[in-house]
Image: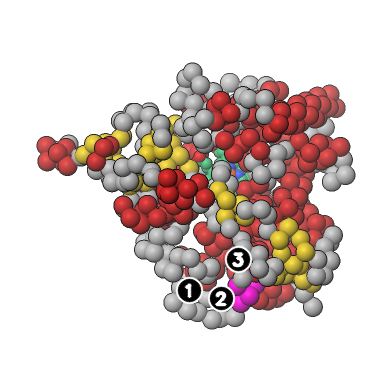
Amino acid sequence: MTQQAQEQIRSEHDVPGPRGLRPGMLRDLQADTPNFLAGLRDRYGPIVRVPLGPTTIYLVSDPVAINDVLISSAPHFDSDIIGKGSNREAPLTRLLGRGLLTSTGEHHKKQRKLLQPLFHRQRVAGYADTFAELAAQRSATWSDGQRLDVLVEMVELTLAVVTRTIFDVDLDSDVTRTVRTALPKNDGPLRWAMSPGGSLLVRLPLPSNLRFQRGRRALDAVVHRMVQERRRTGVVGEDLLSMLIAARDADTGEPMSDQQIRDEVLTLLMAGHDTTANGLAWTFHLLGSNPRAAELLAAEVDEVLGDRLPTFADLPRLAWTKAVFSEALRIYPPVWTVARRALTEYTVLGYRLPVDATVMMSSWVVHRDPRWWPDPERFAPQRWVPSAPDGSTDNLTGTALDRDRPRFSYFPFGGGPRQCIGNEFALLEAVMALATIAQRWRFEPVPGHRVAPRAKIIVRPRGGLPMTVRARS
Ligand code: HEM
């Protein structure tokens, strides 16, 4: 590096940002963290130093810098921002064990390699019919004019989906019942995963911790029983559990231990349902307040599908359906932020950050940058297609397809070695569910009900999402 370039590198103390959080700011931060951070980005720029009591985070909102943290410099970062690697167990690890989401270093690399084939596009394509059938079954329980909590409906649907794809069991089986009662609603103790006191909080004998541990024991017993059964009978299927049992390490040929299989199953159950459920719930909320987008969706599924359920082969012709979901993930990315801890000193955007610095990259914030997302708050699926299904265009049409748009101007699934492994799974599941539901139903907002986001690990509609379901005539 030249002397001049070195001189231009400033210390972490020079990073712009508020010097301390006044009580009013703390209130705003707690009430609506994503928009609070978006406000800081607007005010201070692509890197902001945010002092949060004992911790400081660096909010990085520049797509090229995000690419560097998540991909080019990934080996210099750890995803465990709380546990600091050594003496303190991260809260998520205590709750979920050492599955893919919570493992780090070599263990993560090894597990990722073992699990990756289970989520290849071709493999996931085989689940398309299941996704559509389960959406049809759930929506068949609705009646015209009924007031529903759309979030609850979507959680039930996505839970049925992960349970079926992992265990290949019926909806009325005891396995499904155990999964439904064992998993926490609204994050449970997972809500503390990113807070500095989280390591302590998850150890206290609080009711939500005890409930979570009870649920975990019940699930462990179910998974243990199913693994034993499959090993004894030798019957293997196409479900994820069978594939986890059959997976072998490419170098050593070793299978996973029973404990590891249990940790991976719990991780997939947790990571694989609430995320997609909230993504779908936000989609119906946005469609409810954008009747034109909803009409185009209805027109597309009528034309492509008529009365039959969608299949994988229909995907290329369900472009508007896919655009609707992509746009919903832009405005309400369920996993609204990813964070990394620097393992070495790290220079980003001209500032040298210290070892252990927490770098936060928020899709919520970046997805609202008007440089790539003109009129960012507007729900406009036409950004994602060359023209709407009725051939219409406007000034936003196709803007997301611009080849010059940087990769990390849109990252609802993260990126790099820890990119969401369920990315293809979630997109296919959502498109199949949306197309199936839109064939028969539409959702109307409830007058007077204000929908507001609440963000912990996942951005969910605060207090649920009441809507009125209407049968399409
Ligand atoms: C719309 C739905 C989903 C969204 C928005 C989403 C988002 C994300 C994001 C942003 C990450 C990266 C976190 C990080 O870098 O720190 C992630 C990781 C992960 N997701 Fe998803 N996800 C979704 C659905 C799913 C599904 C359906 C599954 C499984 C069936 C799944 C399983 C996982 C796992 C196991 C990881 C950890 C990967 C690793 O660290 O190697 N996700 N997800």
Decide which of tag 2 and tag 1 comes sooner along the chain.
Answer: 2
Q: Is residue 328 left or right of residue 185?
A: left
Q: Quadrant of the N terminus?
A: top left
Q: Which residue is mark 1?
A: 397
Residue stretch rendered in magenta on the structure? 290-294
Quadrant in the rendering for residue 346: top left
Residue at the spot of label 3? 286
Q: Nearer the viewer, residue 457 or 66?
A: 457
User: Which numbered mark, 3 or 1, is in the foreground of this view?
Assistant: 3
Q: Is residue 158 left or right of residue 79?
A: right
Amino acid marked by disc 1 = Thr
The amino acid type found where label 3 is placed reads Leu
Q: Residue furthest top?
A: 87
Task: Kindly state the secondary structure of the residue where label 2 is placed.
Answer: loop
Where is residue 215 drawn, in percent x and y? 75, 31
For residue 92, which quarter of the picture?
Answer: top right
Residue shown at the point (63%, 35%) measured from the top left: 189
* Earlier residue among tags 2 and 3: 3
Check disc 2 and give the amino acid type. Answer: Ala
Gap in angstroms between the C-alphas marked 3 and 1: 18 Å
In the rendered image of this protein, does residue 372 appear above or below residue 358?
Answer: below
Figure quadrant of residue 271: top right
Q: Mark 2 Cα within 10 Å, few/some/many (few <14, many 20+)?
A: many
Left or right: 357, with 142 as reference point: left
